[in-house]
Amino acid sequence: EASKRPAPGRLVGGTARLDAGLAEAGDYALWDVDVCRLRGRTVHARQCDDLAGVVSILATLDRMVVSAAPGHVIGLFTRAEEVGLVGAAAVARAGVLPKDALVVAVECSSMAGGRAEQGAGPIIRVGDVQHIFSPRVTMWMTQAARELAAEDPRFKYQRKLMEIGRAHV
C-alpha cells in the first residue's frame, strides 16, 4: 500500500560487504557518505542528531549571555544515548542536576514510531511508549511554540507522542 512505501531517496535496508582482512567482528565502521552536504535549506550529514543538539545548546547559551537574560541554565552534553542513555543515566545517578531542574533534551527525532514529519518544524514530545513527560513543561513548551507561530506564520512545530522507547535508567 502507498502509505507503507519509504520516502523517495531514503535508505530502507542495505548490505555491507568487506574485503577479507579489512575488518573483524566488533570493529567500528562508517558508511561512505559525505560528511556534510547542503541541499537548499536541508543539511545532509552523518552526525546530524548529536551535532545539531550541541550547536543548538551552545547557541542558546551564547544568546543568553549576549542578551544578559536572567536565569540559571546548564548545558549538559552526554554520551551513548543510542545504547541506553548511558551518560544521562550517569548524571541522574550522580545527582549532578538540581532536583527541581527543568530538563529539555535536544535531539533529532525519528519519523519511525513517532509519526514526526521531516520539515514540519521542531517536535515537542509529550511522552514515549512507557512514560508521559511533565505536563507542566509540555504545556510551557507548547505555549512558547504557539507564541512563536503567532509572531511568524512560517514557524511550524509538532506536538507528538513517541510510540517507541524503552526504560533506560
Image: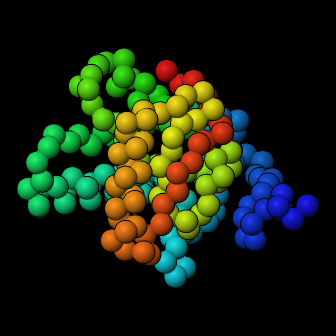
| Colouring | rainbow
> Do we see residue 94 in this rendering?
yes
Q: Is residue 32 left or right of residue 44?
A: right
Q: Image check: 17 left or right of 142?
A: right
Image quarter of residue 145? bottom left
Q: Nearer the viewer, residue 40 or 17?
A: 40
Q: Quadrant of the N terminus?
A: bottom right
Q: What x and y, as percent, mark residue 141? A: 38, 48
Q: Residue furthest left?
A: 68
Above or below, 91 against 25 in this view is above
Query: At 64% across and 57% down in the image, what residue appears?
Result: 31
Q: Could you say which is closer to the camera, residue 15 or residue 18?
A: 15
Measuring from the top left, give residue 136's x and y in whole percent. 37, 36
- Towards the viewer: 120 or 63: 120
Please, which residue is most extreme toward the right here?
Answer: 1
Q: Say whether residue 70 is left or right of residue 139.
A: left
Residue at the image point whose x is 37% and y is 52% from the top: 143
Residue 147: which quarter of the image? Answer: bottom left
Q: Position of residue 83 (x, y in %)?
A: 56, 32
Q: Is residue 141 above or below residue 27?
A: below
Toward the viewer: 48 or 144? 144
Q: Is residue 105 visible?
A: no
Query: Total label count?
Result: 0
What residue do we see at 25% from left, 55% from top?
Answer: 60
For the point 30% across and 35% down, the residue is 102
**Image height of 139 relative to 6, above or below:** above
